[in-house]
Amino acid sequence: GSGRDARTTRWGNGKTMISFLIVLGYVLFVLVLLAGVVATLLGLPGTVLILAGAVVMSAITHWDRPEWWVLLVLGGLALVAELGDNVLAAAGTKYGGGSAKTGWAAVAGGIAGAVLGSFLSPVFSVLGGVFGFALGVVIVPLALAAVGGYLAAYYYELRQGKTPEEARQAGKGALIGKLLGIMGKALLAVIMTAVVLWTVFVPLLQK
């Protein structure tokens, strides 16, 4: 009687706890994916974070969700995203008349600007709401990454003896290249996230 009821209650509580932990795990998994997308807007390797989350989830599900070939596709997309970001920044600088070294200076300046923007994010995020989130997490880091790339290219060209006009053209090219690189990487991050969510959750809904 009472002993059996106690065991049943404990069993029920155990199942509830397990279910809660599973749901919590899925929530954390989705948050990691979203953090990866946001990280790309900060000029950080967010696609690598998304790939890492997918690999961990696949390992937990015995390489079933997502499957191994999906992980290979995600790895290819992450590689293209991370290389393309820097290549576009350097190419933009080259297009503006800057040297290859100026292009890498623009990349370094963009990363420094993005990092500075990430530190300033909480200041603007306190405004709250969608506007505060967009301003603090997206607009400020993105703007500082672009400005950082521009200033790095501009001052590097000046140090190489170029005229201010030539330096401005190189900086402008770096600015455009950096913005295109960040937007392209963010787009690939969104695609990767959609693929991961589809391959992880759709099979669950079909059961």
Image (cartoon, rainbow, N blue to C red):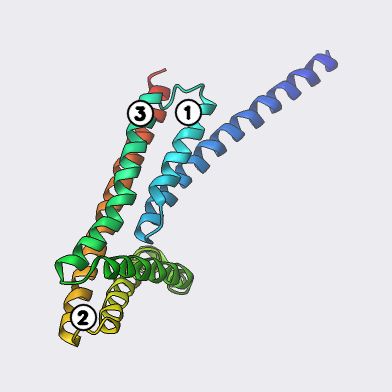
Which residue in the structure is indicated by mark 3? Answer: 70
Q: Report crowding for label 1: few under 14, some 14 to 19, many 20 or more residues within 10 A (C-alpha).
A: many
Secondary structure of the residue carrying tag 3 is helix
Residue type at mark 2: give it: Ala
Q: Position of residue 4 (x, y in %)?
A: 80, 14
Residue type beneath disc 1: Ser
Dividing the image into 4 quarters, which one contains the N terminus? top right
Q: Nearer the viewer, residue 18 or 155?
A: 155
In the depicted structure, whether residue 10 falls above or below residue 33: above
Q: Residue 207 at what x, y percent from top left?
A: 42, 17
CA distance for labels 1 and 3: 10 Å
Q: Earlier in the sequence, mark 2 or mark 1?
A: 1
> In this figure, which residue is indicated by the disc labeled 1?
58
Instruction: Spot the residue most to the front.
Output: 161
State which tag comes first along the sequence, 2 or 3.
3
Asked whether 64 or 185 is in front, the reply is 185
**Residue 179, relative to residue 120: is it above or below?**
above
Query: Dot 3 surroundings within 10 Å: few (below 14), some, or many (20 or more)?
Result: some
Q: Horizontal and vertical percent for residue 50?
A: 42, 43
Q: Earlier in the sequence, mark 1 or mark 3?
A: 1
Q: Nearer the viewer, residue 2 or 141?
A: 141
- Quarter of the rendering containing residue 206: top left
- Asked if the residues shown at circle 1 and circle 3 are in contact, with their CB atoms under 8 angstroms apart, the answer is yes
Q: CA distance from mark 2 to mark 1?
A: 48 Å
Mark toward the viewer: 2 or 1: 2
- Taking the spot 54% from the left edge, 27% from the top edge, the residue there is 60
Q: In the drawing, does residue 8 fall left or right of residue 88?
A: right
Residue drawn at x 69%, y 23% is: 12
Q: Is residue 163 left or right of residue 132?
A: left
Question: Is 99 placed left or right of 58 in the picture?
Answer: left
Determine crowd level at label 2: few under 14, some 14-19, many 20+ residues with C-alpha closer than 10 A: many
User: Image check: 22 left or right of 44?
Assistant: right
